[in-house]
Amino acid sequence: MRRLLSAASILALSLSCNAALAQSPARDPGVAAIDAERMNQAVRILASDEFEGRGPVSAGEEKTVEWLADQFRAAGAEGGGPDGSFFQTAQLSRTRQDGPATITASAGGRTLNFERGPDVLVSSDRPTDHITVADAPIVFVGYGATAPERQWNDFKDVDVRGKVIVVLVNDPDFQAPDGDPVAGKFDGQAMTFYGRWTYKFQEAGRRGAAGVLVVHETAGAGYPWSVLQNSSAAPKFDIVRANPDAERAPFQGWIQRAKAELFRAAGLDFAALKNAARRADFRPVELPGATMSVDFGQIADRVQTRNVLARIPGAQHPDETVMYGAHWDGYGVGTPDASGDKIYNAAVDNATGVAALLELAHAFAAGPRPKRSIVFAAWSGEEAGLLGSTYYAANPVWPLEKTVANINVDSLLPGTEVDPNVVVIGKGKNQLDAVLERHASATGRTLIADPAPQAGAFYRSDHFPLAIQGVPALFPAAGFTGASAASRDYVENRYHQPSDEWGETWRMDAAAADVALIYAVGRDLADSDAWPEWNADAEFAGARAASAAERR
């Protein structure tokens, strides 16, 4: 039985945070006194059942954002949102399952029935209460990528309007053998944005498809089917769009690799088609005589969620911003696991990151005032598709052209042993690596690239919407990369599961060392006049150049 926290417990921690702040001694501004126990207790509270898995637009959200605002205020930060508030309200479209789904396909004279959950997952971002697609032709479009800068177009001149498209997960060069013409075309094992399901859904909508199904394979996706299935009943969110029918297909989702019988029934070899899709001259293949029908109800409405923004104003350049970000949301209350637990407490992912933001606020408030402003952004809706940070990128409170860098904190592991290796998601993309390396080396640590680049983590966390706008991003020390035995255990047994919960034996000493490291990086950036840039071959370099022109 997990421990519930009373209001008195939460108040007691708040008071202890205030006391710790009052007793903070003066120190070298480049060295942070990060309190591992205070971080641990913050995770304990945020990951308790009382916060109901911190689902956006829920009672858990209200408890979470109000508690975070109180903690930032107690740490010595001021509101960083509009008009000095601690909150930025984001307008969202929400859809929720309403009853069962009927999913069938006809091929080769057979009718195939698919069960929602074990076989196929379907949902819709369209704000309507019923989705019906009847007898739509099925087209296999390889990886579904349109990447002119890489001389790649999986769609060619094929019109997929009104058709269900089936696409492969990840990029065309994923698992390509050495010497294959496609090897390295899409950054090798490092998944690009074209490999992400979010891109594939967007491309299907843009091209007018009736639906899109991504073929799930654990290696290419980076997580097992259970991760998708267990969170599938949770509400789906999207930012409010002026014309959602023009941007979103009627339905979207995933299909198990084992259900390739659909291809066999149509007289096609799925494995052969998958191999063919690695060629630049691949053309879409319509499954002969095959059609798919999908019918399900949903509840659609508009809702609001809140980002929590706190700020330490700069003493000399308050209009220039160094940003730290972490998402406060989890999956809320969802599908029960084998034990019957249905609260997705989201302790590692990402109560730990939010606890880090609070510690960073303490550290910056207790030290000398930085030259540039520091903004702490606790984002909403990351698990639903980076929605809080996407909304901010479209509606920035602090100008993006004057945002020096965005340091992302997502999933710190409990433990006492400091890993000598610091994983950097997206290593080699910009000049922030050099700043991190300088401070890591001073403590005997070494930067390493993401050991699981095929999972596309750089395109799956909240720095990404700001990176698209040109803001340099640093994403170090993520715990879901499998870089260590503890990380592998977490990914295999607790990632996005109800079992991602705080334990009585938790210690946050190692995580505190990581937070001290990123404090040093942020302090360095805040007290300098430098403007770090993307490397010339990074996909965001052009956007940064444009923002630099605006800055001048």
Image (tube, rainbow, N blue to C red):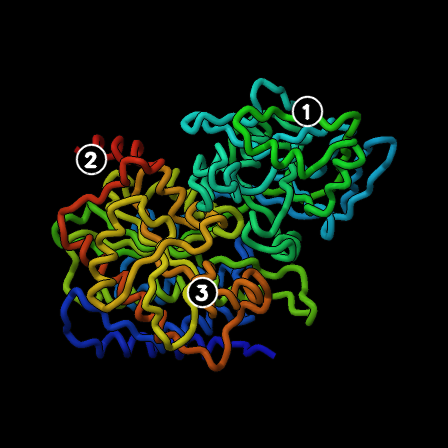
Type of amino acid under label 1 = Gly
Residue 350 is situated, as x and y percent measured from the top left of the image, at 46, 61
Inter-mark Cα distance, 3 to 1: 42 Å
82 and 102: which is toward the camera: 102
Type of amino acid under label 2 = Arg
* Residue at the spot 55% in from the left edge and 27% down from the top edge: 154
Q: Which residue is mark 1?
A: 162
* Front: mark 3 or 1: 1
Q: Counting residues from the N terminus, which is met first, the one under dot 3 or under dot 1?
A: 1
* Residue at the spot 23% in from the left edge and 76% down from the top edge: 22
Q: Residues within 10 Å of mark 1 (few under 14, many from 20)?
A: some
Q: How many discs mark residues in the rendered view?
A: 3
Q: Which residue is mark 3?
A: 351
Q: Residues within 10 Å of mark 2 (few under 14, many from 20)?
A: few
Inter-mark Cα distance, 2 to 3: 35 Å
* Front: mark 2 or 1: 1
Q: Is residue 244 visible?
A: no
Quarter holding the C terminus is: top left
Disc 1 is placed on an element classified as: loop
Inter-mark Cα distance, 2 to 1: 45 Å
- Name the disc covering residue 551, or none: 2
Residue 541 is situated, as x and y percent measured from the top left of the image, at 30, 35
Residue 465 is situated, as x and y percent measured from the top left of the image, at 40, 42
